[in-house]
Amino acid sequence: MNVIAETTIEADPKVPVIRMVRDFAATPEQLFRAHTDPVLYAQWIGPDSMATRIEHWDARTGGSWRFVSERGGVQFAFHGCFHEIRPDRIVQTFTFEGDPDGVALETLRFEDLGGGRTRLHTQSLVDSFEGRDAWLASGMEVGVNEGYARLDGMLSDGTV
Amino acid sequence: MAADTLSRVFSALADPTRRDMVARLAEGDTTVNRLAEPYRMTLQAVYKHLRVLEDAGLVSRPPGPQPRSVHLEEEVFDLMDKWIERYRRQAEERYRRLDAVLAAMNETDDQKGRAT
């Protein structure tokens, strides 16, 4: 089986969906924990330039979550519900509070590749193409501001 | 490219006939009549689809001798690819942080495994 070492992305032209696939050197159980344990989650979800603070976290089917990322005194808050939590699958909603009417439905699937490797499939469904484009646009903004300095650092010092 | 432009591109491509038109135009410029040939629809309907593609900036009909040719504006696709690529890179960056978290978990889990 091919190794998907770098994130692949697909923006469906028919439905406002973004799909991504990425392989990890971890078991499905570890990947599940990194997505449901708030201490672990806060370590990787936000951009490097932001400090992420989990305000509320109830990673159970029917539970909810909220976290705040901060950069230079500016706060970006996000919240949503855990629609379903299973060892191999997480379904949750995701809203950026700066755009409170916008909500994405995210489906994460952990595919066991064996040998301590797991393939993560994510799908984000938003309510309109406009919504998806705003999503992509926000990605662009952060991506540009962020730079890749820390990533380069992690690559060179062997963290990655 | 502004967000509303990208939206127009995505909605223009949400239709299977228009996607097929774009695919055929990728092979080269053609006339409206030739473009319309495979479709079971009136020429008027074909013009309607073309108008949507034109409004999205995906195709143009440069002035010239009649019949005017239909031209695919491929650079619009390049811009779209750039947006999606930036989003992808941002996700990749996030997943590299996740790699680091998982690597640290591996170490902790190994230590626990040895301890028991």
Image (tube, coloured by chain):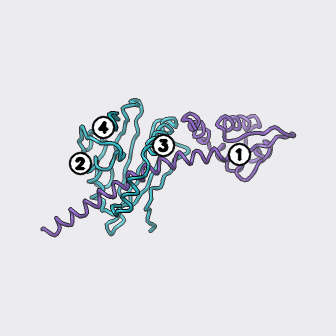
Give the residue type at disc 3. Met
The quadrant in which the N terminus of chain A is found is bottom left
Q: Are marks 3 and 4 on the same chain?
A: yes
Marks 3,4: beta carbons within 8 A: no
Q: Number of numbered discs present?
A: 4
Residue at image x 42%, y 46%?
A146
Q: Colour of chain B?
A: purple
Q: Which chain's colour is cyan?
A: A
The furthest residue to the right: B65
**Label 1 chain ID:** B
Query: Mark 2 highlights which residue?
Result: A39
Q: Residues within 10 Å of mark 3 (few under 14, many from 20)?
A: many
- Which of pointers 4 and 2 lies earlier in the amino acid sequence? 2
Disc marking residue A140: 3
Q: Residues within 10 Å of mark 1 (few under 14, many from 20)?
A: many
Tell me where residue B88 appears, x and y as whole percent.
47, 50
Tell me where residue B48 appears, x and y as whole percent.
71, 34
